[in-house]
């Protein structure tokens, strides 16, 4: 059954409402007594790069397996490019490319044969897939190794081949499940470049443990934990949502920070304070409070006042906690 | 059902088989040939005739059949386990617009093809080194058994490769179930060797129907319809079971 695509209100800042590539409504998946997804709601705009973050066991893999039709939900709906995941699995799979956590390359087929098999499974004719494979191998820098077996490739090359395989049939939505896990920094950046080069031509749904990766690539980021969506927005929006507070580090010249720490701790606009030997880190309600601080410290030998930028990691940790998940 | 996916996966498997055909055939021919030389030739002078048939001729059809069904079983079980648990290629197939049934049917066809090719290879070698010759219609009757038997064992391999996650379990099942079923079905001795009370039970085994039926078809040109029906029904039942079990496992 084809669902009618409609304008999506989830991107609150946009004037012309873009269509949604993925619509998830109250999606729930229960394994026995464990609820892996708990009434999860999400919309992903067509053509965007969307990042899904969450600690281990948050439900990311369950969500991606449902969206790629590898698993059926317990309740709720997932609609990809207008097709329902429960009823239109084949139509969805026609339109998606999947890069799973495992490389899942066929080690008994050459790089080119891996792509050819995938093209045939998608029902492409030889005259369609041969030029497409030539192009993808060229794009991924694997033309010279197309007759070699994946076992002889580096981790980065194998990853590029998996991405090429997912693109053979020109999908409308590309799912990337931790695409750079285990790669060295150079290979990781190379994969980022390929992902960036695809931006706009298709919707990209990415899960990752590397917050820098999400920050670098994604237009929108969702953070989930315990099967629920707990935050959604652009990187900047998520940082801004982190209590609205600003953090400054004040370093003093030649004297202990103790007396100033006590002074600052008593001020109403200071909501948090920590002290090192010659510096004090203060969390202020808002940046406007900074002038009050400077006035209070009148006469002190201040060497430097620096704004501490919040990172996506700060946001992630503040939302999901510091405790290590099993 | 669209079988595009089945064809693509089967062609992939045949490409791999083509690449390693000589080493595969060498390995697969060595075992039954050793058995034949050890039992057929070594024991011939002690055993002489079995039910009026020279012992070498008595065991030849069974060895060919054993090679075929073993090859079908092993290819299916290990291929499915490897693609599912090690290489994760089954998952990469499942995110393409083909059905789970197409995947399992492709793997059954691959096991079946392996069985037929390897069985024929052993048959050619055994006939090349023995004086036994059969009329063409006997070979045709024999194939009536060999084809559903290869399908039956291929489906059984698919079931094992689907439900067993550990390779050692697969090895144990082969040692305590598959091989005894083959060896106790009259491959090397006539069923009349069993105690009278046991014979009706042994005859219920599909492997007995297969080895007895195949031997009579090849040696005497007789098609025992009850045996043939038993083998065909076993193949049909395991085919349905293999598809259902694989589909269920994939939906977990």
Image (cartoon, coloured by chain):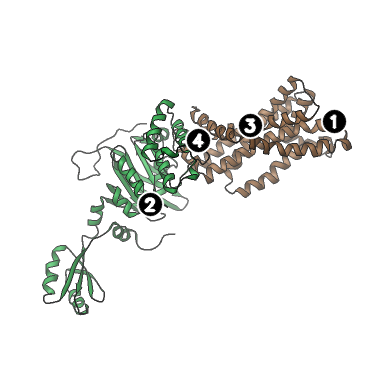
Mark 2 vs mark 4, CA separation in Å: 28 Å
Q: Secondary structure at mark 2?
A: loop
Q: Which chain is brown?
A: B
Q: Residue at (65%, 30%) from the top-left corner?
A: B117
> According to the image, label 1 marks what residue?
B54
Determine whether label 1 and label 4 are within 8 Å by CB: no
Q: Secondary structure at mark 3?
A: helix
> According to the image, label 3 marks what residue?
B151
Mark 1 vs mark 3, CA separation in Å: 30 Å
Where A253 falls versus B223 (above or below)?
Answer: below
The crowd level at tag 4 (other Cα within 10 Å; few <14, some 14-19, many 20+) is many
Q: Colour of chain A?
A: green
Location of residue A149 in the rendering, given as x and y in whole percent from the top left corner: 50, 41
> According to the image, label 4 marks what residue?
B100
Relative side of A291 to B102, left or right: left
Residue toward you, A192 or B88: A192
Determine whether label 1 and label 3 are within 8 Å by CB: no
């Amino acid at each position: 059954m084809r669902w009618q695509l409609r304008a999506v209100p989830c991107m609150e800042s946009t004037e012309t409402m873009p269509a949604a590539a993925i619509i998830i409504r109250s999606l729930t998946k229960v394994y026995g007594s464990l609820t892996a997804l708990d009434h999860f709601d999400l919309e992903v705009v067509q053509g965007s790069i969307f990042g899904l973050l969450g600690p281990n066991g948050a439900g990311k893999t369950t969500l991606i397996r449902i969206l790629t039709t590898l698993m059926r939900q317990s309740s709720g709906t997932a609609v990809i490019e207008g097709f329902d995941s429960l009823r239109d699995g084949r139509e969805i799979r026609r339109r998606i490319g999947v890069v799973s956590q495992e490389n899942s390359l066929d080690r008994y087929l050459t790089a080119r044969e891996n792509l050819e098999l995938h093209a045939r499974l998608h029902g492409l004719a030889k005259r369609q897939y041969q030029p497409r494979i030539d192009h993808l191998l060229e794009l991924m820098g694997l033309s010279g190794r197309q007759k070699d077996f994946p076992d002889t490739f580096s981790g980065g090359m194998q990853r590029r081949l998996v991405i090429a395989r997912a693109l053979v049939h020109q999908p409308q939505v590309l799912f990337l499940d931790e695409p750079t896990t285990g790669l060295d920094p150079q290979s990781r950046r190379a994969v980022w470049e390929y992902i960036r080069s695809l931006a706009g031509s298709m919707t990209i749904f990415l899960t990752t443990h590397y917050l820098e990766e999400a920050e670098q690539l994604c237009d929108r980021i969702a953070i989930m934990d315990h099967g629920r969506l707990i935050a959604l927005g652009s990187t900047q929006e998520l940082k801004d949502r982190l209590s609205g507070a600003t953090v400054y580090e004040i370093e003093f010249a030649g004297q202990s920070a103790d007396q100033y720490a006590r002074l600052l701790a008593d001020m109403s606009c200071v909501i948090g304070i920590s002290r090192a030997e010659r510096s004090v880190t203060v969390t202020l309600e808002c940046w406007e409070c900074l002038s009050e601080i400077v006035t209070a410290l009148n006469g002190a030998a201040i060497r430097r006042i620096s704004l501490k930028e919040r990172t996506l990691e700060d946001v992630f940790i503040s939302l999901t906690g510091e405790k290590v998940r099993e | 059902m669209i079988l595009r996916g089945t064809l693509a996966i089967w062609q992939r498997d045949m490409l791999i088989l083509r690449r390693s055909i000589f080493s595969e055939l060498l390995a697969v021919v060595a075992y039954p040939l050793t058995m034949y030389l050890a039992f057929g030739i070594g024991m011939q002078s002690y055993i002489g005739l079995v039910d009026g048939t020279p012992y070498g001729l008595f065991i030849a059809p069974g060895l060919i059949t054993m090679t075929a069904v073993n090859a079908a079983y092993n290819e299916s079980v290990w291929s499915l386990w490897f693609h599912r648990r090690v290489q994760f290629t089954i998952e990469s197939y499942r995110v393409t617009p083909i059905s789970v049934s197409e995947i399992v049917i492709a793997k059954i066809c691959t096991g079946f093809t392996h069985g037929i090719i390897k069985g024929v290879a052993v048959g050619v070698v055994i006939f090349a080194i023995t004086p036994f010759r059969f009329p063409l219609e006997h070979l045709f009757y024999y194939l009536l058994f060999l084809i559903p038997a290869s399908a039956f064992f291929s489906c059984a391999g698919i079931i094992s490769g689907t439900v067993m996650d550990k390779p050692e379990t697969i090895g144990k099942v082969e040692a305590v179930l598959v091989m005894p079923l083959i060896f106790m079905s009259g491959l090397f001795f006539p069923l009349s060797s069993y105690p009278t009370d046991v014979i009706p039970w042994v005859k219920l085994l599909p492997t007995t129907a297969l080895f007895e039926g195949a031997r009579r078809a090849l040696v005497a040109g007789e098609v025992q319809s009850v045996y043939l029906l038993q083998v065909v029904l076993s193949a049909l039942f395991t085919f349905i079971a293999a598809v259902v079990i694989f589909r269920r496992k994939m939906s977990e």
